Image (cartoon, grey):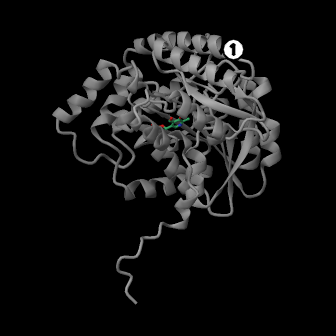
Amino acid sequence: MSSKGKGIRAAARVRDIRYAVRDVVQLAKEIEATGREMFYLNIGDPNIFDFETPAHIRAAAEDAMERNRNGYADSDGVPEALDAIRAEAEGKGIRAIRHVWIGNGVSEVVDMALTALADPGENVLIPSPGYPLYSALLTKLGVEAREYFLDEEDGWQPDPEDIAARIDEKTRAVVVINPNNPTGSVASRETLQRIVDLAEEHGLVVFADEIYDRLLMDGERHVPLASLSETASVLTLGGLSKNHVAPGWRIGWGIMSGVQEVVAEYVSGIQQLGRTRLSANHPEQYAIKPALQGDQGHIAEMMARLTERRDLMLEILGGVEGISCVPPRGAFYAFPRLPDDVDDAEWARNLMKETGVVVVPGSGFGQRPGTRHFRIVLLPPLEILGEACRRIAAFTMSG
Ligand code: PLP
């Protein structure tokens, strides 16, 4: 029988994949086409606002292209970049580094690391709320994304007791995002220590997603999770997207630390996968060393602006009955709470239609049952962010 003209069926594994940060854009574009002024507060891309990749980092990538570093790189990455990543990690107290590799963004590094780790029927503990990359990739792999909760009453700290209660014999890893997206919370040393100890006791890999580790407010200090144990198996994740304002370059890395005999087979699985995709983006890798070792002046400047923007957001939304917000202290997001009887997805859709403000509903990141939130990015300049927050306030009060 001929199949000519028949629709092409998509594989079952992609049907349940959700990625709320971009999924909301479809409706936003439809609304924009009607001529409405839109405020896109849905995506964590600093370069679409008034932040730029620092000149010395840009120059290094441009220079690499000039020097015709435009072929494939080694599958793990170029040696000078790998050395710089390792040196930075050691400088932060991460010992027992067993493997470092570069991928097309932390997104690809996580994809490789989960693919090489878990089989269908197993589970990985992910933070709720948390960045939806992890649940999307786990859905693709047929691995259960098992949520553990961050405690809103405790400044969105991860709850180690909740983690402990969810571990079973099929659990392979626990993901910690610190500073956290979407809450902007920064985890305490004590909390991180308890998570590392739990992971070690149960033979789990910790995915320490520290892509925002230099973006801190109010004098907060970041504790690299892998620095708390030389024997736990920790995959520390970092990259150029956020700290170094170059998300479009798609450069991220993974640093596997722990006991050599314990992680050896896993690392060789990751390397096997790495070879099949040849290499990550090549010329941009030459920007890693100058990014990590060069002038960091842009960070202080960026955080001064973000702190001002956060304070404005807190001031405007703080005056709205029904909205409360744990003040973010890192990254560039906030996760304000809505009244429990509101449907956050519907609320976000109506907000978009009535005011043009695009935010991501809390359900896109996970939230404790019965609670409702939305995520807002703090990146827009004061005038835009202020106007968007005033519209959110008026919309909420009118509803
Ligand atoms: N991890 C977290 C916590 C993020 O918020 C993001 C992007 O928003 C990523 C990873 C993706 O990073 P990359 O651009 O390196 O793929």
Where is residue 389 shown, x and y percent of the image?
57, 19
Give the mark count: 1
Cβ of mark 1 under 8 Å from ligand 1: the answer is no
Q: Quarter holding the C terminus?
A: top right
- Callout 1 crowding tier (Cα within 10 Å): few <14, some 14–19, many ≥20: some
Residue position for label 1: 318
Query: For residue 92, what is the image quadrant?
Result: top right
Nearer to the camera, 298 or 290: 298
The answer to whether residue 229 of the structure is visible from this angle is: yes
Image vertical order of residue 130 relative to residue 245, above or below? below
Q: Position of residue 248 (x, y in %)?
A: 36, 35
Quadrant location of the N terminus in the rendered image: bottom left
> Which three-letter amino acid code belongs to the residue tagged 1?
Gly
The answer to whether residue 210 shows anywhere in this view is no
Is 82 placed above or below 218 here?
Answer: below
- Drawn side of residue 80 relative to residue 26, left or right: left
**Where residue 122 sits: x, y (%)?**
68, 59
Where is residue 149, by image quadrant? top right
